[in-house]
Amino acid sequence: MRYHIWTAGCQMNKADSDKLAAGLERLGLEETARPEEADLVVLNTCSVRQHAEERAISKLGVLRKLKSRHNLTIAVMGCMVGPRTDNLRRRFPYVDVFTRPQEFDPILEAIGIDGQDPGGEFWPRTFAVPKGPTAYVPVVHGCDKFCSYCVVPYRRGRQRSRPIAEVRDEVEHLVSRGVREVTLLGQTVEAYGDDLPAGQAGLPDRPDLADLLRALHGFDGLYRLRFLTSYPRDMTERILRAVAELPKVCQHFSLPVQSSDDGVLERMRRGYTAAEYRQKLDLLRRIMPEAAVSTDVIVGFCGETEAEFRRTYDLLAELRFDKVHVAAYSPRPGTIAWRRMPDDVPREVKKERLRAVEELQARIAGEINSALLGRTVEVLVEEEKGGKLGGPARPLGGRTRSGKLVHFGGTHPEPACPEDSRRVEGARPFEGLFARGESASGGRAQLGDLVNVVIERTSPWSLQGRLAEAATPRMGGDQPVPLPERPAGVAALQPRAERP
Ligand code: SF4
């Protein structure tokens, strides 16, 4: 039996799909990249934006045709499945099973292999099989914040943190299979541990994200740790200091602001003011002046006036984020805003505001990235682009510690916006000496290698350069890094395998 999983939305969905795939393979199913060859197709959906739902609905149209030609089981999983399931059932009667995020068992029932326990967190001991040198590991499920526009708490439930030992087991499994970078996931990841009892991993108090980072830091073979998404109110000085002190933890933050107008923030029920957000970012940048910070913004939220939007625009211009994810507000059924607030900003106005933010951010990101021209950055090699068969070069791609996308080796494409690209005078063309990702000494970079790349060209969205040499991983993971306020005993945490 063959399966195909289509995934929309956030990294959490991606992690869920990987875990489902691991479980299905454990039960003897085989993955196929072509839905027309599959006996089971799972759509892992997102409903955070209307556009994401529309994409899933269009996929369902294609699957209906496939199902009319051969015996196909269709499962719809993820955030589209919630209280409106009856609606969905009426609209898409040919779908065999609707199941909520991370509820895998109904899918097994639909294909007639229920009753088997593949083990794991949801299936106790089924961890995702890594498909490359990077992996996502959910550490907090659900969310307790109930922002007025957001469906996540209704679809993914209340916050549940995974015990440190369970996360450590999963990371150990991934690292032993070649993963070099792990991103810890949570909708509000700094809330990690709030719902756990004291005494976890020998800690006298409830663990927090700082404790978790220390517990994972010592794995040999793990080069980088990241985490997302941050929530301003949950981000503590203790966590920030741990990030600054642990060499493997990337100083790269995703800290959504959503709006910079206190009235809009209140209507969004974000739980902070613009001033409090600024204070938190200021603390972060004082502790880590080199940190990269991205943010999320919603434009055209219910009742947003031109002046309110202008405050957000001015904040983005002033705080200069590395990246801004901007979306026009669309009401999500079941949320507080959908129930109580009119979606009264005209579509055209939303589009204009969206465009204004995109243009501003393209300029800022272009300036930030162009400051890297001629500098050497550490890149983890994550992908090898196809290139032409028998052609001279296969470009490699990866990310810096700050999360910037870097292409090097091979024949690079022209930037999407040539007027926004900058180029080092006299830079060596990509074809030639460093083609195929080879360094001056002839070494070939492999997936999962840490390498140094000299940046020769930049755009607001990515960097291009040439391979300089292998980079030395920032280890130091086994060195206790004392924090003044850390309770006794935390520094001694080691991966389970290394403990007596
Ligand atoms: Fe949604 Fe707000 Fe929770 Fe983020 S913090 S997942 S926006 S409810």
Image: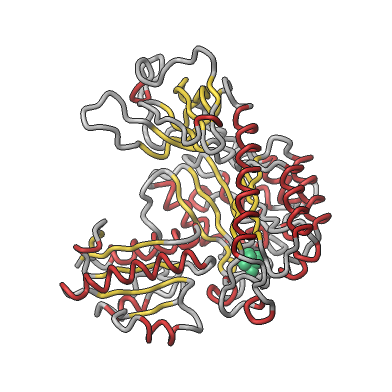
Image coords of residue 41 (percent x, y)? 29, 68
Seen from the viewer's position, the closer of residues 97 and 325 is: 325
Seen from the viewer's position, the closer of residues 170 and 144 is: 144
Q: Quadrant of residue 275?
A: bottom right
In the rendered image, the vertical position of residue 384 relative to residue 79, given as above or below: above
Seen from the viewer's position, the closer of residues 500 and 335 is: 335
Residue at the image position 25 percent from the left and 77 percent from the top: 111
Question: Is residue 429 something that shows in the picture?
Answer: yes
Residue at the image position 37 percent from the left and 77 percent from the top: 105
Image coords of residue 488 (percent x, y)? 74, 53
Q: Quadrant of residue 386?
A: top left
Q: Quadrant of ligand 1?
A: bottom right
Residue at the image position 58 percent from the left and 61 percent from the top: 186
Left or right: where 351 falls relative to 180: right
Image coords of residue 276 (percent x, y)? 82, 56
Q: Residue furthest left?
A: 69
Image coords of residue 258 (percent x, y)? 68, 58
Quarter holding the N terminus?
A: bottom left
Left or right: where 255 falls relative to 19: right
Left or right: where 402 falls relative to 74: right
Question: Is residue 199 something that shows in the picture?
Answer: no
Residue at the image position 79 percent from the left and 46 percent from the top: 283
